[in-house]
Image: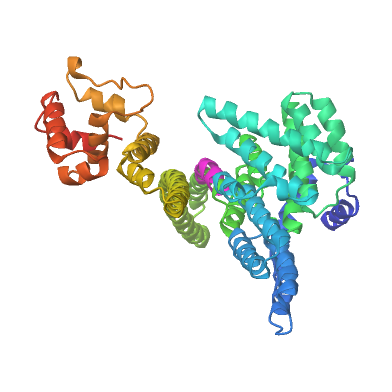
Amino acid sequence: MKSSILLAFIFSFNCMQSATVKTDSLISVLEQEILLSKKYVASKENKIKNLISLLEDEKVNLNNQYFIISKIIDEYQYYSFDKALNFTEKNLNIALKLNDDFKILESKLKLGRLLVDSGRYKESLDILKGIESKKLKDTLLREYYFIHKEAYSGLSFYTMVKNRKTDYNILYSKYEDSLSKRLKKSSFEILSLLEKKYRDNRDVDKALEINSKRLKECKMGTREFSLVTFERSLLFQLKADTNNQKKYLCLSAISDIRSNVKDNASLTELAMILYSENDVERAHKFITFSMDDAKFYNSHLRFVNISNILPTITIAYENKINNQKTTLKNFIILISALGFILLIVVVYVFKQNKKLSQAKNNLKEVNDKLNNLNKELNFSNEDLSKITQLLAESNDIKEHYIATFLNLYSEYIDKLDIYRKLVTKYIITNKTNELLDLTKSKQVIDNELKIFYKNFDESFLHIYPNFIQQFNELLKEDEKITVKNSEELLNTELRIYALIRLGITNSTKISKILRYSVNTIYNYRVKIKNSAINRSEFENLVKKIE
């Protein structure tokens, strides 16, 4: 009865700053909320089901579908990453069908926000690469800067490389500043940024003052309330005020459960504090519930964080069970002296002991599976990072050479057209001698050949910027090649072996490309090969230059 009265009090008073509410009572309320969580989930699922049913109406046009799915995405955003992602991609496809620029940009930003909120910072930034900020309206522009700010904040926090951390912090400050300039003074968002600055500068009192203003604008059972109370707990952590830290973590966790926020952090932090206070049973209960939420939402970031904590609490929980088992055994030995009358009690305790052993084995199996999953996840993340890097490099090269090819093709068309007009002019004006002189001249070919060499050199060195250095490392010290002509990046010898590096090894093909005789190409190759440190493997080593 007392718990129900306290629960009603908490839900009716949004700010929750009363000193009379004891932390232990809040923890009891939190335990009750965990028991009620299935009821909240059922209500959430029913609401989503009703929204999805609206899409089944054949009369719903694409614009209405986009609106309904936007509502569905809002429901799934912090509830289920996979489903939120699925519907966000659906909305993006609808926006593309409608050819509505605003909806396309809005959908891409929603996708970026979903990825950054779930800790997928690199993927989020990749989505935003294709968006031009100049084309965004104010509301979308603020979201654009917000996503960048959150992504670089997360990357800065998790990176182990000091130089990268500095770079990320610079980018974070840049986008935070851009965002701040577009927010209204005293708005909820600007207060959030201001509070973080004070917190980062360890000016806790000012940060608490800002947090109190934000808290007054929040309502229990909303995502905003959960965030503000969680951030308030961080401030009390800086003040080493554990009691208040636990209090606001409880409030944040209660709000998360009521609003069905599965991507949460409050319960995990609370479990660690309770573990440090030797309240192992509650710590285990809360960390297990938090792990279930992380699995349900499919939050890799939360999953990894909890996976690092769960074994510690689980071991402590097992030790507590073992201690209870030892105490139970001693109790059995003690009461066994009472004789045959208490034999029934001994049998019962023995059965309980078997159940405890089974529970221990089950916990061990779960822990082993969790460790294996964690290893697999780490391997998957490493592979994904490598693949992402390779794809990014491949895309850069493709874009560069498509642009180069198109530019060259266009230039040659223009030159052919100019040449055509010139020939036509000479024929019309009966200047056949001048036309004959023009066609006999090699000046045009020589000029085009210079341009060809220049484009080839620049393009090749774009792919292999260290080619000259690595090529010279294969030659004897006194035979190293230097490009003497300041107007060229490569000389003839280097171009021949540049083509060999690209897989063109036939001297006849090389002679056609570089417009030299086959004998000249052959002589160059022999000359350079004789200058090599390892003559027999020289050309194979050239093919491996990166």
Query: What is the magenta range?
Result: 302-319
**As drawn, is 272 to the left or to the right of 189?**
left
Of the 4 image quadrants, the one containing the N terminus is: bottom right
Q: Position of residue 167 (x, y in %)?
A: 58, 29
The magenta stretch spans residue 305: yes
Which residue sits furthest top? Answer: 478
Above or below: residue 207 compared with residue 346: above
Which of the 4 quarters of the picture holds residue 437?
A: top left
Which of the 4 quarters of the picture holds residue 492?
A: top left
Q: Position of residue 248 (x, y in %)?
A: 77, 41
**As drawn, is 506 to the left or to the right of 447?**
left
Magenta stretch: dominant secondary structure:
helix
Q: Please tell me which residue is depicted at 70% across the width and 36% down the height of the picture.
A: 175
Above or below: residue 59 compared with residue 485: below
Which residue sits furthest front? Answer: 430
Of the 4 image quadrants, the one containing the C terminus is: top left
**Which colour style is shown?**
rainbow
Q: Nearer the viewer, residue 142 or 542?
A: 542
Q: Nearer the viewer, residue 353 or 264?
A: 264
Q: Nearer the viewer, residue 204 or 247?
A: 204
The magenta stretch spans residue 91: no
Q: Position of residue 501 (x, y in %)?
A: 25, 39
**Number of residue marks:** 0
User: Is residue 43 visible in this depiction of the protein?
Assistant: no
Q: Nearer the viewer, residue 97 or 278?
A: 97
User: Is residue 112 visible in this depiction of the protein?
Assistant: yes
Q: Position of residue 52 (x, y in %)?
A: 69, 75
Above or below: residue 494 compared with residue 393: above
Q: Please tell me which residue is depicted at 83% across the width and 37% down the height of the picture.
A: 191
Which of the 4 quarters of the picture holds residue 249?
A: top right
